[in-house]
Image (tube, grey):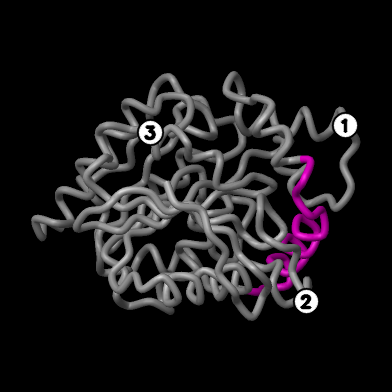
């Protein structure tokens, strides 16, 4: 794996670049996390034939905090950052894999990059104007909007996101995250910043894969099934039975098999 920094107009961005192959997969982490969350995929034998590029969003992981937080810490701002990184590293036709916030960023990025070959989202309801429809009331989502979290609140947030896979590396990533990103991102979303993601899902021509954990307590799983996707991969939304909000960590073997199939279908031109 090769780790390096990329200069962007939003600040320096850290990249973990691993493997080679005909598919270049951009891995986009969630709120208050980092690229380290995708270590099971980087280590996966099923994905060994692909280039995996895991990126730390501004204000997360080894990336710098945003130079202009109000500009950067929004879905459009994060998407703009990724567009700069993808261009800088020379990936012409990326496949985007976004988890939670990362899935929302992938959907935000899709209209900007018509060369995207496919998108896989996890724990990221493609919401339109009625954002609440995609999430479960009373869940730990509320912690994701707060700039300041106590140690107990951060732990509760981490347990809701990662469950049994919460470890010292992920705790450190959550503690490091710039709390301004949480607050600004939610304020901007409620103010209407960003694309209508349901509209994107219903008009995105390339394959869109939906993989969630059946035990996810943060999102409304049934909401996904009511969307009229333009090109839903395999014709259905997948739910991994032994997984929660982070299915790629809870069941990396099953997730890796699905992602490998998705990439194979894209390379074969199957839609």
- Local secondary structure at mark 1: helix
Position above or below: 208 against 204: above
Task: Kindly indicate the quadrant of the structure image that contains residue 77.
Answer: bottom right
Q: At 78% across and 76% down in the image, what residue appears?
A: 68
Q: Which residue is mark 2?
A: 68
Q: At 67% across and 68% down in the image, what residue appears?
A: 74
Q: CA distance from mark 1 to mark 3?
A: 31 Å
Quadrant housing the C terminus? bottom left
Q: Nearer the viewer, residue 166 or 118?
A: 166
Pick whichever of labels 1 and 3 is earlier in the sequence.
3
Mark 2 nearby-residue class (10 Å; few <14, some 14–19, many ≥20): few
Mark 3 nearby-residue class (10 Å; few <14, some 14–19, many ≥20): few
Pick whichever of labels 3 and 2 is earlier in the sequence.
3
| Residue 157 belongs to magenta span | no
Mark 1 nearby-residue class (10 Å; few <14, some 14–19, many ≥20): few
Position above or below: 261 against 166: below
Q: Nearer the viewer, residue 201 or 27?
A: 27
Q: Which residue is mark 1?
A: 151
Q: Closer to the camera: disc 3 or disc 2? A: 3
Q: What segment carries the magenta color?
A: 175-193
What kind of secondary structure does the magenta stretch mostly adopt? helix
Q: CA distance from mark 3 to mark 2?
A: 35 Å
Residue 103 horizontal/vertical position (percent): 49, 54
Q: Which residue is mark 3?
A: 43
Q: CA distance from mark 1 to mark 2?
A: 27 Å
Q: Closer to the camera: disc 1 or disc 3? A: 3
Residue 83 horizontal/vertical position (percent): 48, 74
């Amino acid at each position: 794996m090769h780790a390096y920094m990329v200069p962007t107009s939003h600040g320096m961005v850290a990249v973990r670049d691993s493997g080679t192959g005909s598919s270049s997969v951009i891995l986009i982490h969630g709120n208050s996390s980092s690229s380290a969350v995708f270590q099971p995929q980087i280590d996966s034998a099923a994905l060994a034939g692909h280039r995996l590029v895991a990126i730390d969003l501004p204000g997360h992981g080894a990336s710098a905090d945003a130079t202009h937080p109000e500009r950067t810490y929004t879905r459009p701002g994060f998407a703009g950052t990724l567009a700069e990184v993808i261009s800088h590293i020379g990936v012409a036709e990326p496949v985007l894999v976004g988890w939670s916030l990362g899935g929302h960023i992938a959907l935000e990025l899709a209209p900007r990059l018509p060369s995207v070959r496919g998108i896989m989202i996890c724990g990221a309801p493609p919401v339109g104007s009625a954002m609440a429809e995609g999430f479960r009331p009373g869940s730990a989502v509320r912690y994701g909007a707060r700039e300041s979290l106590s140690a107990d609140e951060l732990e509760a947030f981490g347990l809701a996101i990662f469950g049994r896979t919460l470890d010292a590396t992920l705790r450190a990533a959550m503690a490091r995250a710039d709390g301004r990103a949480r607050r600004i991102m939610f304020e901007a979303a409620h103010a209407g910043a960003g694309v209508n993601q349901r509209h994107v899902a219903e008009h995105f021509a390339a394959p869109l894969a939906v993989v969630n954990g059946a035990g996810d307590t943060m999102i409304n799983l049934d909401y996904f099934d009511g969307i009229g996707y333009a090109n839903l991969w395999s014709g259905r939304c997948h739910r991994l039975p032994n997984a929660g909000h982070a299915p790629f960590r809870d069941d990396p073997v099953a997730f890796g098999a699905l992602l490998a199939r998705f990439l194979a279908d894209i390379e074969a031109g199957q839609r």
